[in-house]
Amino acid sequence: MASYPKAAPKKVYYLVRTRSLFSCFLHWVFFLSVVVLILTGFYIASPLLFHGHGEAFQAYIMGYARLSHFVAATFLIAGFALRLYLSFFLCSRHDILDILPTPKNIAGAAKLAFYYLTFHGPHHIYRYVNPLGGIGVFSLITFCAVQIGTGFLLYLPCADPIFWGGAVPLAQSLVLKLGGLQSVRLIHHIVMFFLMAFIVIHVYLQIWKNTMFEEADIASIFSGYKMFPEEIVRVFDKGFESYEVKEE
């Protein structure tokens, strides 16, 4: 009687909650805000289109672009402020510690980056934010903080002093110390390109990780769940937030 090799047992995966639906919502608020800011920012910096009929004052496209820029910036600031506030509370696991560039996080990010580049060496599979992602989030926050600050410096010198009060002369003083509006504008533009590069790298890494590790990284930003094999879920159930993979 012929014998057939036994089929390897199928690996069992489980859905594991990795972020709240509100965190997913804020992620897309950030994404849409940044996209609108980049597109309108390009136009404000170099207006190539004119819309309307008659005199120049009847072409409102620059006004629409500036309004959209301000509205998107407002959503970005509000979203970041809310997420930062929540990161200090248990509902978000006090995850402010996951994104700060502590020696532990920097070392973990370096190991993970080395593994991603070489596929060699030990590494950890993380339930929540991994150290490399945490350093990336910290970099994103830094870029956005610079953009918000320089954006206000570009706007406030010509803003209504009755509404903004003492912020107007303070902004004018800071602009002079930085070398004038053109220097502030240059900083605003340079950081914008860093921000665009970050988005490209982030999207690429998520697609790559989704393909290589089959953890449903992309789907998790919509649903809040990722997929992990049974042996990793058992480690998570014991209270650990990462699973060490020892490879040569």
Image (cartoon, helix red, strand yellow):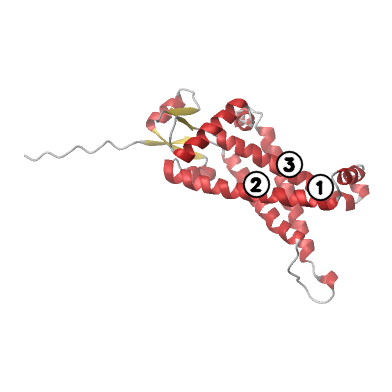
The residue at 71%/50% (across/down) is 190
Q: How many marks?
A: 3
Of labels 3 and 1, earlier in sequence is: 3
Indicate the amino acid at tag 1: Phe
Image-quadrant location for residue 62:
bottom right
Q: Position of residue 207 (x, y in %)?
A: 49, 48
Distance in Å between CA atoms under marks 2 and 1: 19 Å
The percent position of residue 101, horizontal first and vertical second, equals: 64, 31
Task: Name the residue carrying label 2.
Answer: 30
Callout 2 amino acid = Phe
Q: Which residue is mark 1?
A: 152
Q: Which one is earlier in the sequence, the residue at label 2 or at label 3?
A: 2
Q: Say which of 196 and 10 sits in front.
A: 196
Label 2 CA crowd tier, 10 Å (few <14, some 14–19, many 20+) = some
Residue 2, visible in the rendered structure: yes
Q: Which disc, if any, is residue 115?
A: none
Q: CA distance from mark 3 to mark 1?
A: 11 Å
Which of label 2 and label 1 is nearer to you?
1
Frontmost residue, 135 versus 1? 135
